[in-house]
Amino acid sequence: MPEQIIRIAVMSDLHCTHEKNDKSTYLHSDLCDTPINQNPIESLKQLIEKEELSTDILLCPGDITDRINKQGFVSGWQYILSIKNALKSKNLIATVGNHDLDSRGGNYNKIGKNLNKDYPYNIDEFKEKFWSQNFFVLDLDEIIVLVFNSSFTHTTKEKAEQSIITTEILEAIEIELTKTKDSEKFKVAMCHHHPIKFSNMDELYKDGDVLEKGDHFLDLLEKYNFHLIVHGHKHIPNLIYRNSLPIFCAGSFSSLANLHYWDKKNTFHIIEFSKIHKKSIIYVNGIIKTWEYSYTKGWTRNQKNVFPCLTGFGYTGSIDLLAEDCANWFYEQNMHMVNFTELLKFKPDVQYLIPTYQEKFVNFMREKYKLQFHPTFDNAQQIIRIEI
Amino acid sequence: MKSIFTQQISEKDLKDTHFDLIISASGYETRARFLIEKVELNSSYKFFIGFNNNLDLFDRELNDKTFINQGYTSIMEDGNNSSKIECFLEDFFFTNKQEKLNILVDYSSMTRIWYASILNSIRKVKKLKSVHIFFSYSVSEFASPPEKHIFSEHVEPVEGFYSLSVPQKPTALIIGLGYEKKRAFGLKEYFNADRTFLFHTDNSFNKEYAIKVIENNKELISEIDPNNIVKYPLMDLVYTETLLRNLCLDLMVDFRAIIAPCGPKPFTLLSMITSINYEAIDVWRISAGKSANPVNREPTGDIVILKAEINHPK
Amino acid sequence: MKEEENIIIQYNTYNARYLSFEEVAESFIPNQEFYKLLKNDNSLLMGPRGSGKTTLMKMITPGAIYNWNSTEAKEIHKEIPFFGIYIPSDIQWMKQIQSLEKKLGDNKDISKSISRMLVNTNILISACKTFTHLLLKIPIEGKLLSKLESFIKDLIKFWNIPKPIPLSIDAIVDSLHLRIKEVNTTVNKIVSENLHFNQIEKPNYFYEEFFDLLVLACNSFENHFKDLNVFNSNYFRWALCFDELEIAPEWLQLELLGFLRSRNQKFLFKLATTPLVSLYDSTNKKYFKIDAQLDNDYKIIRTWLSSRTDEKNWESFCNNFVSSLIAKKFNFKIHPLEVFGHYNDEKTFYENEHSKFQKAKSKSVYEKYSAFWIIMRELAIKDNSFNKFLLSKGIRPENPITKQKAIEDSVLRKIKPIVIFRYYFKKPEEKLRSRKITALYYGLPNIYHICDGNPRTIINLVTEIYPYIKIKNDCKVNEVSISNQARVAQFVSETNFEIFSNHPDANIVLNNTRINLGEVLTHIGKYFFNKIVTNPFTMDPLSVFIIDEKVDAQLIVLLKFALNVGAILHLEPQEGLLNEQELRNKKFRLSYILHPLFKLPIREYHTINLSTILMDFLIQKNNIQKSKDQFSLFNK
């Protein structure tokens, strides 16, 4: 059993706007008379209440508004606060996205700075640091959160095309992280832009806005034993490893940009970190529960459309070996069908697979060991032998 | 992988494109010739489909003349039939040697059966690597719906836009509301639909029209869960398609979905495109046995163009 | 997610078709038809749309019946002599098949093969659902798990399910669904490449018979699980419950009617259909003769009310049903009487004319100063024909009472509803009051009678009443006012009328004239209203019609539709199966649900030929068409 658990909700890229005719997002500032399912915020609150969801932290990796729409920004932040309250989260931590800055209007971060006393975090010291040094490190009871403003260079239209983490900032971050080096707390980093190349799905556009020196940033996070980095910007969710560091793109909570073309949907996630000591080693794993939004149905968590509804991270060992162990165990049972919960008791690692590993694992099990997860791996109830 | 990708384009894009084929329709509506009078189009081959009735009504003669003067050839067809159109297209594709084609279809004055059969004929031509179909729609001025209630008599799947199923999953019905009185009334009961969704235009298209839609469907609207009533901006076809497609994507898991477009033609077109992308989605035709009194439709000046790129699976 | 889960009842509608078996069980209230259907015999369950057939058919399958918790349920669980397999059908499916037939045109072999294949697949998937529900009764572990494995392997073998396949019933169902996808590909190939059916390689499933496949599967189930205590091995019998037979492909309808002559002792056929059975075999262009003998080989169970006993049963069913609906909605158990109250003449008129009816309180019905006495006296003043009628019966109009019990029974009791309607609508000098709402449709058992044996209508009516139900602090409810009850009855009546008239099949063309069912129903309704209210008073007015020889065949097509949707009802149906060619000379009436709209009493009176009723209407229609023709001729 995990010794410690912490839950983090993530809502990214809301792109809330006041523009009525802007149909690139579901989230407008005047949704008060909209049926509940057609309002992503109200329908999420309904889900939270119905499923009694609660988290310790709510993260928002940027793009609260769309093209620095002021009313959208104000409403978007209020929406986020209302979700924080619904989730009974103690902490709400945000960062700035490229849409939250006025890169066309001169004083590029004035609106963000004046938005709300709690934005991007509710303690002045950290706010000041965020706006002056473009990052802050928050050392909470159980978790350390590093927040970086990857849009800090977006002072003009031209500069808004790219994002960067400079050597100076990396050095400044490292000074802060040194203080936490030996901490056994969970460690999470957050920024808006993707720190590693993330190709677009189409062939028309190149991935031109990856965080410059993002690799150095990731090196630093690995060096200081971070367990996860969360980012936004790309509207399609994704979870990959860079070495052993999981990088989680949270997709978009309510924007339609880049989604409709590929039949992808908006997402909301809850990450559950767990910690186990084995001998002198601490193992930190995580599972991610994902809900998808649909305009008439609201938030649901059933089918694999955008992203597995249940995935995880932490297992970086051999998938082939994992599959072999699981298959051997299955055949020892001498049954054609075993409940999935039994398998989890035998091999909890099965929960901590990122989506590509899940796919690889499922394929091994099916092709090599003739075993099928029913109905799907991310919602598995049983594991069933395949008759050949 | 979707079979059709869509994007909304401007009149300028039409001007800048060379078309291998243009298909238009000539009837009594003024808007039938609006596109070719407004936009200078560049094409290798062009023809129009003429309705075989109402030959001397309203603008019919003028429309025919305009098309002929611009070098269009013609075929005559019944509004409820499409066999001649299909034969014509079959010949066209048989002789065509190109692998990539640009085709413009002005469906403003076409019947649903016509543009359904055009879309279906084009998408079935497997030898083409890619086809870009530009669907152009000239928006008309508001004309009041017929006062008299006309009963729907034909309720059937549109050829090429349905597939066989077994009744193990319930029917979900998506109705695209139109402004004719009670056209969609009773469909829910007819299909014994387990879920019913209504799509209607928001005010951005035409306020008068939007109000009429609500007024003439009020009984049906009052029966439906507000979450299942979707307002769409007709002039934003891609967003509307997203709404429709996302709904279909959700429904396919637990239902057999039917789209019954009773409203504006662009919505019917989007229904057909959705059905091509998801074969399990049916498009059904709901139409009156006896057509309403003819009404001339004057163009507003707006043209909505959807570019659909059809990819054949390799 | 399983398809049965997560289904919410829609706004204002209720349709058991897609309620999960569990949900159907949850709100189920048994009726007489249910107990008849549970019997160990072949049955034909007949009733118009919405009359609860689907609920009954679903209730006799393991998915529902074992989830039904009530005192009577336990006994039934032990005694039920079969395991039901519910086989759905629907309009979407039927129209898809019809469109296919149209598309393939002359090539009837292909469409029939495909139609057969679709039907077979549908039946096999249904059987899988029943197997799954039965297996849910057993804790599957140890030895039973290996039995389950062996049973699944049998299904794979018997049904030619392609391997590799996971050893689960769900995987078999997935594989069966895959066949549908394959068939669609085959159809596309045939159409786009203009192929002949013989040129296409066809899998074995095109040649299989569903019954043979079912026998193999069900026998295997029995062999594997018959020793278990949960299954009563004496009753290892299967009932194939085909719902909505009338919209199934024609060949299946005829085949199933043929199966009613018992085919295999282990299999029963329970067929649900509309009141009219089509026996026309369009392939052989002749009428199909059912070999099976009524009562010997099969029983007919009718859902509509055709006798006084039926009515009494319906009332008692409604009391339980409405009470359970209200309890579910308000979490509060009450008797429907508290909501609707009793129907009572004095109450009807007291509200608007209280000074006139004040004295009527506490008087018995035919006593002096009773409400009815006042009404008769008043009516006799403004209605000369009624005055004469009373005199002819030896009753004094100024004091309409009688000391003779026989006259009270044979005259007063009989004329009472007519008198009340005439009084309600008549003004002096033969004029009629224009009343938007008829405040005569309220109270029990009137409200139940209006719904005419149709549970869907009662649900709709009660749903509309909900907003008027107020629960008071003392845990009592208010009785919903007469006008609100009448308003709801009127609304439900109008809605039903609109649904009947707007149905795409509700139109015919007769002598180049389009006729909608709504027009015909309205004409019949008005005709009867005139007979009861406007025309000179008679004790025996009309409310029943016979489809006589003079009624045009085209019009009969419309009436068949009306019968199947429940707009009209067949009276005296005891004679057996009503098939299409036998509609003539049978008695019918308008459904009581249309009576509030047409302002007719909920009673059956005398009979008249339909051709007489419709004569004026058809002449009028014909004249309109003639003048239209002349106009268009003139234009030309």
Image (cartoon, helix red, strand yellow):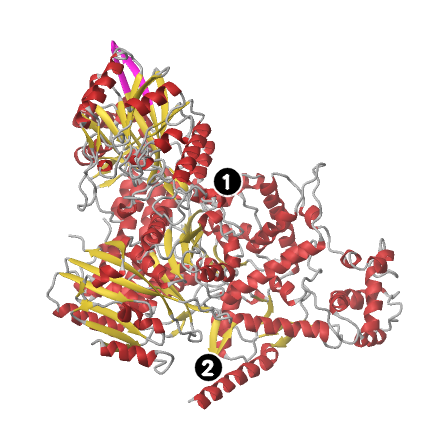
Foreground residue, C411 or C174?
Answer: C174
Which residue bears the numbered disc 2?
C512
> Residue C78, which numbered label?
1
Which image quadrant is residue A56 in?
top left
**Disc 1 versus disc 2: nearer the observer:** 2
Foreground residue, C33 or C413?
Answer: C413
Residue C15 can be seen, yes or no: yes
Q: Residue at x 60, y 54 (%)?
A: C461
C382 with respect to A107 (left or right): right
Q: Position of residue C603 (x, y in %)?
A: 68, 65
Could you tell me which chain the residue with mark 2 belongs to?
C
Main secondary structure along the magenta-highlighted residues: strand
- In the rendered image, the residue lying farthest to the front is A106
Q: Residue at x 75, y 69 (%)?
A: C422
Q: Position of residue A359 (x, y in %)?
A: 22, 34
Q: Position of residue A39 (x, y in %)?
A: 43, 42
What secondary structure is marked by label 2?
loop
Q: Height in image: A222 above or below C614?
A: above
Foreground residue, C147 or A115?
Answer: A115
Q: Residues within 10 Å of mark 2 (few under 14, many from 20)?
A: few
Which image quadrant is residue C405 in?
bottom right
